[in-house]
Structure formats: C-alpha cells, structure tokens
Image: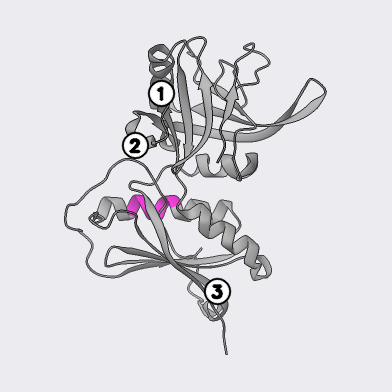
C-alpha cells in the first residue's frame, strides 16, 4: 500500500497526520491484531468459554463464522490475552454494526459468529477483516515495521473522531485523535525524540503514511488527513476507538452457515 508524505502546517489548520492541533476532537467475543505482547506461555484457559449477545441463538442458523488464531504459531494465548482479545473484538462487532454475535474461545482459537443487516456479504467480509486489524505508530522509516520502535497504539487513544475539512477548496477527510493520559505522555515523548525526523503509521504490515515532526506536541491531540489506506476515515476511527489486540491475530477460516 502506498505511503503518503505529509507536511505539517499550522497548529490551527493542519494537513498532517501528526499536528499540534487541539481537536474535539461477528461472531463471538473476539480478538484483534496488536503488535505487542507476544507470549509463548501455556494458556490459562483450557475449557471452552462462550459468550453471546443474547440467549436466543436461532440466528446462528444463518450467520457468518470466523475462526481466528494467533498469527505466530508458537504463541499460546493466556487468559489475560483471551480476555483482551474478546474485549477488542466485541467492541468492533458492535461499532461496525453486527446485529447478533457470539464469541467462543477454546484451544488457542477465537471463533466469532455474527450476523449483519440483511446478512450482506460485503459488510460481513469487511467486518471479518476489521476484527484482526492492527494500527500502530512507529518511530523512523523502514519497509519492515517490526524493525521500528512502537511509539503508541490504539490503547493509548481516548477518542478518535472522523470528519472533514476544506483545504485549498477541496474536501479532506480527517480523523481527530485525542490521547488518554498515558498516551499524552507517549505522544509528547515521541515528538521530542523524533523532532525534525519522521515517524510512520502502519496497518498491520502495510505502510499508511510517513510523517515529518516539526515541533513537540504537548496537548495530547493530533489530526490525520487522507492517510487511511483502504479503510477510509470512518473505519479508521472505529478501529482506533476499540483498542489494540494483545498479539497479532489472523483469520484461519471464514464461512457462512446457512440453514438447509
């Protein structure tokens, strides 16, 4: 995915991914794809755990099923990682419009069952893709994100809001990000460390943007402009608002159950 080279303009009107602007800003419980916290410790969860949005599971006769596992075969999910993964995935199911969902965890696998409005296949495919997405912000430039230090993730974000602004007579789609307390400190430290240097924004292993840092950001907020890849501003904000997965996850299989 091609990257955008973005310059920072003023603190009030920014055409950058990182600015000093003050902005206002399915399946079952599931897991998403984070970039930190790899673990090879034995799983503390051996029994099957199942949680559903309602007791009536008749909707499962016609639903989508995503089987999700850690991206690295040698990673065994701990109880804490199961819990965090399910929390993130449940938020994504809700925010992305799953009408029903059920999340099972067993044998190092998260299985998500869900329905969407009219069981639209395109929406279901998109939601399945979003469940495992990982968006990270890293210091420096490289074609391999794992070589770069992670400066913050979605867990450091209090709120992300999509919107639009006009620049040079053209409409620009934006995501305004407000950091939580821990994230605010990380953002200030990162912009101090990379002052007059570059940081990069990644969606999994795809480079979304390379950003020059011209000054230190101390108010804990910034605006992203047109650097959303195939996600678009709305989906980008949704992913950032649901937090980061504890370990990278991937879809092992994706099928549709249909009542005969």
What residue is shown at x 80% (from left), y 27% (from top)?
A: 170
Segment tinted magenta in the rendering = 83-88
Q: Are marks 1 and 2 in contact (CB under 8 Å)?
A: no
- Magenta region, mostly helix, strand or loop? helix
Residue 63's tag is 3
Residue 116 percent across, percent down from the top left = 61, 65
Q: Residues within 10 Å of mark 3 (few under 14, many from 20)?
A: many
Q: Quadrant of the C terminus?
A: bottom right
For this orientation, the residue located farthest to the bottom is 260
Q: Of the residues under marks 1 and 2, which one precedes in the sequence?
A: 1
Residue 81 percent across, percent down from the top left = 30, 51
Is-magenta flag for residue 58? no
CA distance separating discs 1 and 3: 43 Å
Residue 140's tag is 1
Which of 249/242 is in front?
A: 249
Q: Compared with residue 16, is residue 156 higher up or lower down, i.e. above or below? A: below
Identify the secondary structure beneath mark 2.
helix
């Amino acid at each position: 995915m091609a990257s955008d080279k973005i310059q920072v303009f003023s603190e009030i009107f920014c055409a950058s991914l990182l600015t000093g602007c003050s902005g206002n800003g399915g399946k079952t419980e599931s897991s998403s794809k984070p970039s930190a916290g790899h673990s090879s410790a034995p799983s503390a969860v051996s029994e099957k755990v199942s949680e559903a949005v309602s007791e009536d599971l008749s909707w499962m006769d016609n639903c989508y099923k995503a089987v999700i596992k850690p991206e690295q075969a040698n990673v065994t999910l701990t109880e804490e990682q199961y819990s965090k993964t399910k929390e993130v995935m449940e938020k994504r199911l809700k925010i992305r419009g799953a009408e029903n969902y059920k999340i099972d965890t067993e044998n190092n696998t998260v299985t998500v069952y869900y329905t969407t409005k009219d069981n639209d296949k395109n929406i279901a495919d998109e939601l399945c893709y979003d469940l495992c997405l990982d968006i990270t912000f890293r210091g420096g430039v490289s074609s391999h994100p794992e070589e770069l230090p992670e400066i913050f993730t979605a867990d450091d974000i209090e709120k992300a809001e999509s919107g639009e602004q006009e620049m040079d007579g053209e409409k620009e789609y934006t995501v305004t990000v407000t950091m939580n307390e821990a994230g605010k400190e990380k953002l200030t430290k990162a912009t101090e460390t990379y002052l007059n240097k570059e940081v990069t924004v990644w969606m999994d292993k795809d480079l979304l943007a390379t950003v020059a840092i011209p000054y230190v950001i101390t108010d804990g907020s910034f605006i992203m402009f047109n650097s959303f890849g195939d996600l678009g501003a709305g989906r980008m904000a949704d992913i950032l608002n649901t937090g980061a997965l504890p370990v990278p996850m991937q879809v092992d299989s994706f099928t549709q159950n249909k009542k005969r």
